[in-house]
Amino acid sequence: QVQLVQSGAEVKKPGASVKVSCKASGYTFTTYAISWVRQAPGQGLEWMGWISAYNGDTNYAQKLQGRVFMTTNTSTTTGYMELRSLRSDDTAVYYCARAPLSTSLDYYYYMDVWGKGTTVTVSS
Amino acid sequence: QSALTQPASVSGSPGQSITISCIGTSSDVGGYNYVSWYQQHPGTAPKLMIFDVSNRPSGVSHRFSGSKSGNTASLTISGLQAEDEADYYCSSFSSSSTHVVFGGGTKLTVL
């Protein structure tokens, strides 16, 4: 079955970086993008961006530009999200999700399968 | 502050129908038929319920339906069941510099 398995919880100090992994299985990895969405404690969902597993194209949320970097490894069918210069308000659960291409839009705007989430805590 | 506006909470009794609204602008909900809805139970990952305004993924109950009129998208749940109690989020493609926007979420309580 389609599955996304994320790496474990992380605790980081302000100013550090974190890299979260997302191992995909059960589908052809390169026919979808991997999107990342985060959720601060008690808050709603925030879209961070996506990376096409087909060609490595990326699209990031404007507020995270320059701090977030998404990559994939097609040989291991794994996606990665690195967030740099961490601040306390980056404390959140980070989800990866499979994103189908909307062919009429030529964009990955929705997510059909989600990982269980990775808790990232930023604290001094 | 979320780009899309949802009511903070809605409630209904088992068997009833409820509708959750999602208000956007002509730059997102009103300008495109690319609205999705997600269900999230406490402590779990979101689950896709609707995409492209009104399409249900396989496995999602027919009790869930989506629609749109102008700048407002709606999720209707008919025949409410206890397991429908969850948070619901709308999302839309946007022509702004951040191309995917979410609503703030609506907590559904089944009385």
Image (spheres, grey):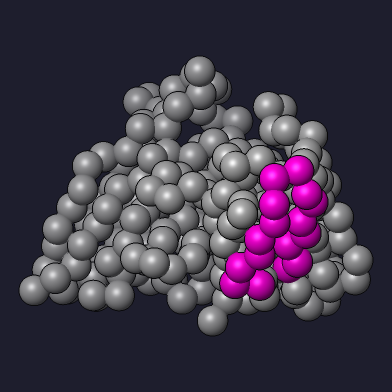
Range of magenta residues: B7-22
Q: Quadrant of the N terminus of chain B?
A: bottom right
**Residue A59 seen in this snapshot:** no
Residue at (50, 18) in percent of width and height: A1
| Residue A69 among magenta residues | no
**Splitting the image into 4 quarters, where does residue A69 fall?**
bottom left
Foreground residue among B77 and A66: B77
| Residue B19 among magenta residues | yes
Judged left or right of residue B14, residue B98 is left
Residue at (14, 70) in percent of width and height: A123
Image coordinates of residue B65 in percent, x first then y, are: 81, 46
Foreground residue among A73 and B92: B92
Image coordinates of residue B98 in percent, x first then y, are: 59, 70
Judged left or right of residue B19, residue A29 is left
Residue at (30, 75) in percent of width and height: A89
Residue at (28, 66) in percent of width and height: A91
Judged left or right of residue A122, residue A48 is right
**Splitting the image into 4 quarters, where does residue A28 fall?**
top right
The relative height of residue A78 versus residue B46 in the rendered view (above or below) is above
Foreground residue among A105 and B19: B19
Name the residue at the right extreme: B69
Judged left or right of residue B10, residue A5 is left
The relative height of residue B88 versus residue B45 in the rendered view (above or below) is below
**Splitting the image into 4 quarters, where does residue A3 fall?**
top left
